[in-house]
Image (cartoon, helix red, strand yellow):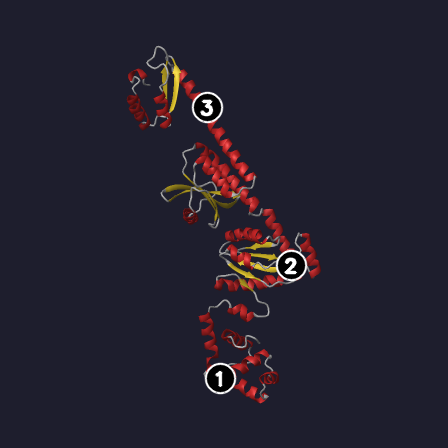
């Protein structure tokens, strides 16, 4: 304990003394004041100096005993804690009001910035930016998201990240026991931010649950819906079942998505349920299947799913299994194309060829048709081959369409078989020739 008598009322001496105290990690200073003491009151310069240095300043009257000092310290700490918790409660009420009014994640984080000075960004489990405040630029938010996903913190843990000369702390928030996303906050010197950040995470989880993600009960119900529809025989009963689910779909389409992991598939279930507004969706390992009542191509493409996506043809409600099988087939093709693929019913050659680039199609058709093209009368042979396949390999019908004698057609078909050294009765050979002709653009109007 040091008496003010030793320092006097000189402002410079106090400045040096307080600097020494702070270098020794002293948290507070008690000053005795009174008529018989050097200081009858605490000078204004000393009050300002203590506030600037964040040093607790306590004044007591008369010659202070240890008990008096202790009582004043306890009172000051209690007052400080009360004010802190009042500020924290007020902040929590403010954030709750934002969520209750449905203002969204961006405004929630903006309110957090105003109250705590903390820049903040929220990403989902696959790194998409869900919201940010003005303390974080769009570019920085993207960088922070990528770095968090390199080593994402588990529930209850945190991870420190540096970006743009600032330190950030990333923590996970959850709905039930499932990680929904990550809150990334910059540094703040306000204690209420430390106390209230857990409430912010809880509100983010609530906002996710309310606006985006399905509960486990809802997931199971929607999976049961799609299974029950597949078990129903007949369009009338299937349409009645759909109406009971609140949708009046006369036609349905299957959508199948293949993801890189089961965790990613969980996210896709939530995404598709939201963007396609479907009560019929399920996850099977890394694959997500759903049924919709409108063409989903535009919505899926605009949303930018980075996964393989197949879309089936529009069928009546009683044929849900068919459109899902088609979507599965299209999904396998989508893996190579890198874009959502629609199954084309009755025109499989278009469906297959749309996945290949022009160079590949040319190389394929050249390899298959070159023996025919390079022979004498090659153009007539190709025309005959195409018409023969169109007419289901009927010599008479082909001859009629080409306006030539049937013996001419028969001779040309035999010549083609010789040039290719292939069995033209083989379905594999016929399929390959048909695809090669279509890749070349021969007979597109047929």
Write the residue at 51% across / 46% down.
180
Q: Nearer the viewer, residue 220 or 396?
A: 396
Q: How many marks?
A: 3
Residue 203 vertical position relative to residue 262 in the rendered view, above or below: above
Q: Which residue is mark 3?
A: 79
Work out how far the residue at label 3 is from the one at label 2, CA to CA, in angstroms.
66 Å
Which of label 2 and label 1 is nearer to you?
1
Which of label 3 and label 2 is nearer to you?
3
Q: Mark on residue 406?
A: none
Write the residue at 28% across / 23% down.
12
Residue 234 x/y as whole percent: 70, 61
Work out how far the residue at label 1 is from the one at label 3, CA to CA, in angstroms.
99 Å
How many residues crowd around disc 3 within 10 Å: few (fewer than 14), some, or many (20 or more)?
few
* Residue 437 seen from this side: yes
Q: Mark on residue 378?
A: 1
Badge 2 or badge 1: first in the primary sequence: 2
Q: Secondary structure at mark 3?
A: helix
How many residues crowd around disc 1 within 10 Å: few (fewer than 14), some, or many (20 or more)?
some
Badge 1 or badge 3: first in the primary sequence: 3
Q: Secondary structure at mark 1?
A: helix
Does residue 431 appear to the left or right of 23 in the view shown? Answer: right
Say if mark 2 contacts mark 1, CB within 8 Å: no
Does residue 73 appear to the left or right of 3 in the view shown? Answer: right
How many residues crowd around disc 2 within 10 Å: few (fewer than 14), some, or many (20 or more)?
some
Q: Which residue is mark 2?
A: 230
Say if mark 3 contacts mark 2, CB within 8 Å: no
Quadrant, the C terminus:
bottom right
Residue 378 vertical position relative to residue 21 in the rendered view, above or below: below
Residue 48 vertical position relative to residue 377 in the rendered view, above or below: above
* Residue 176 seen from this side: no
Write the residue at 57% across / 48% down.
214
């Amino acid at each position: 304990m040091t008496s003010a008598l030793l320092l006097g009322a000189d402002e410079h001496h106090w400045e040096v003394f307080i600097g020494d105290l702070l270098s020794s990690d002293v948290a507070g200073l008690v000053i005795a004041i009174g008529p018989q003491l050097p200081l009858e009151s605490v000078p204004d310069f000393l009050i300002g100096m203590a506030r600037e240095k964040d040093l607790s300043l306590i004044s007591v009257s008369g010659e202070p005993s240890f008990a008096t000092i202790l009582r004043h310290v306890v009172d000051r700490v209690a007052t400080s804690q009360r004010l802190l918790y009042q500020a924290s409660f007020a902040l929590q009420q403010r954030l709750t009001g934002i969520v209750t009014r449905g203002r969204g994640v961006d405004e929630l984080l903006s309110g957090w910035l105003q109250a705590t000075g903390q820049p903040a960004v929220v990403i989902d489990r696959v790194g998409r930016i869900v919201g940010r405040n003005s303390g974080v630029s769009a570019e920085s938010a993207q960088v922070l998201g990528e770095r968090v996903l390199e080593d994402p913190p588990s529930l209850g843990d945190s991870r420190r990240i540096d970006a743009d000369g600032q330190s950030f702390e990333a923590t996970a928030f959850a709905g039930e026991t499932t990680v929904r996303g990550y809150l990334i906050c910059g540094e703040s010197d306000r204690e209420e931010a430390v106390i209230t950040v857990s409430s912010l995470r809880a509100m983010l989880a609530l906002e996710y649950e309310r606006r985006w993600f399905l509960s486990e009960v809802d997931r199971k119900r929607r999976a049961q819906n799609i299974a029950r529809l597949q078990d129903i025989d007949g369009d009338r009963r299937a349409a009645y079942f759909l109406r009971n689910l609140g949708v009046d779909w006369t036609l349905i389409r299957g959508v199948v998505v293949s993801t890189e992991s089961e965790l990613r598939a969980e996210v896709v279930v939530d995404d598709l349920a939201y963007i396609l507004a479907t009560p019929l969706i399920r996850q099977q390992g890394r694959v997500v299947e759903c049924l919709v009542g409108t063409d989903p191509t535009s919505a899926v493409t605009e949303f930018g799913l980075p996964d393989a996506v197949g879309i089936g043809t529009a069928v009546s409600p009683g044929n849900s299994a068919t459109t899902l099988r088609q979507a599965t087939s299209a999904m396998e093709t989508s893996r190579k194309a890198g874009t959502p693929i629609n199954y084309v019913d009755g025109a499989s050659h278009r469906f297959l060829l749309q996945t290949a680039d022009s160079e590949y199609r040319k190389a394929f058709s050249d390899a298959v048709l070159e023996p025919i093209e390079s022979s004498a009368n090659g153009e007539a042979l190709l025309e005959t081959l195409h018409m023969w396949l169109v007419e289901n390999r009927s010599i008479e019908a082909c001859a009629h369409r080409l306006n030539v004698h049937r013996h001419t057609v028969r001779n040309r078909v035999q010549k083609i078989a010789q040039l290719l050294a292939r069995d033209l009765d083989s379905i594999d050979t016929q399929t390959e020739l048909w695809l090669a002709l279509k890749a070349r653009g021969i007979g597109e109007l047929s």
